[in-house]
Image: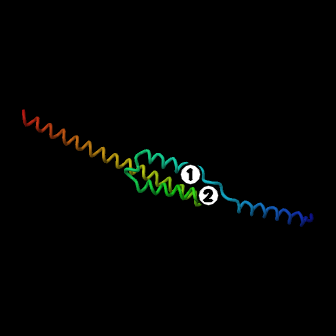
Amino acid sequence: MKLINHKYVRGTAVASLLVFMAACSSTPIAPTRALNAAQDAFTVAEQGDARRYSRDELDEARQRLVKAEQAVSGDRMVEAERFAQEALITAELALARTDAAKARKINEEMGKGADALIEEMQRTGEKQ
């Protein structure tokens, strides 16, 4: 029967515990990918004229981005990730609502054009 060296086991346990505690106490990595994606989505929405058609959502996306950046500055990375994801979703919503509003406007203009064409055809038909 082999005897276990208690000093070795104790030393290994202490070293393992120290490594575990250091890993738990270290600050998580900044959510750079999420922040970049949110910023890109915000820029696309802004360039897509969301300020005109979906101002509230665009403003909310900007606020979430600012909160994400503040959370990164305060080493609150989990919170920063959440705010960045919320900013991304809100910016995408702003763009979707903008696209829908633009499509409605185009449909209305096409309807007016079709009505004018029908009117003109009726006038021309009555004259013949």
**Point 70% across, 60% down: residue:** 26
**Point 42% across, 49% down: residue:** 95
For residue 41, side relative to residue 32 (left or right): left
- In the depicted structure, whether residue 114 falls above or below residue 83: above
Q: Quadrant of the C terminus?
A: top left
* Mark 2 lies on residue: 73
Q: Amino acid at mark 2?
A: Ser
For residue 109, side relative to residue 24 (left or right): left
* Numbered tag placed on residue 35 in the rendering: 1
Q: Quadrant of residue 12?
A: bottom right
Q: Earlier in the sequence, mark 1 or mark 2?
A: 1
The residue closer to the viewer here, 44 or 99, is: 44
Point out residue 101 in the picture as x, y percentages from the top left corner: 34, 49
Find the residue positioned furthest to the top: 128
Point out residue 92 in the picture as x, y percentages from the top left corner: 46, 51
Q: Secondary structure at mark 2?
A: helix
Point out residue 83 in the picture as x, y percentages from the top left corner: 54, 58
Q: Amino acid at mark 1?
A: Leu
- In the depicted structure, whether residue 5 falls above or below residue 52: below
**Point 36% across, 49% down: residue:** 100
The residue closer to the viewer here, 43 or 34, is: 43
**Point 33% across, 46% down: residue:** 103
Spatial CA distance of label 1 from label 2 is 13 Å
Disc 2: CA contacts within 10 A as few (<14), some (14-19) or many (>=20): few
- In the depicted structure, whether residue 91 falls above or below residue 14: above
Q: Are marks 1 and 2 in contact (CB under 8 Å)?
A: no
Q: Secondary structure at mark 1?
A: helix
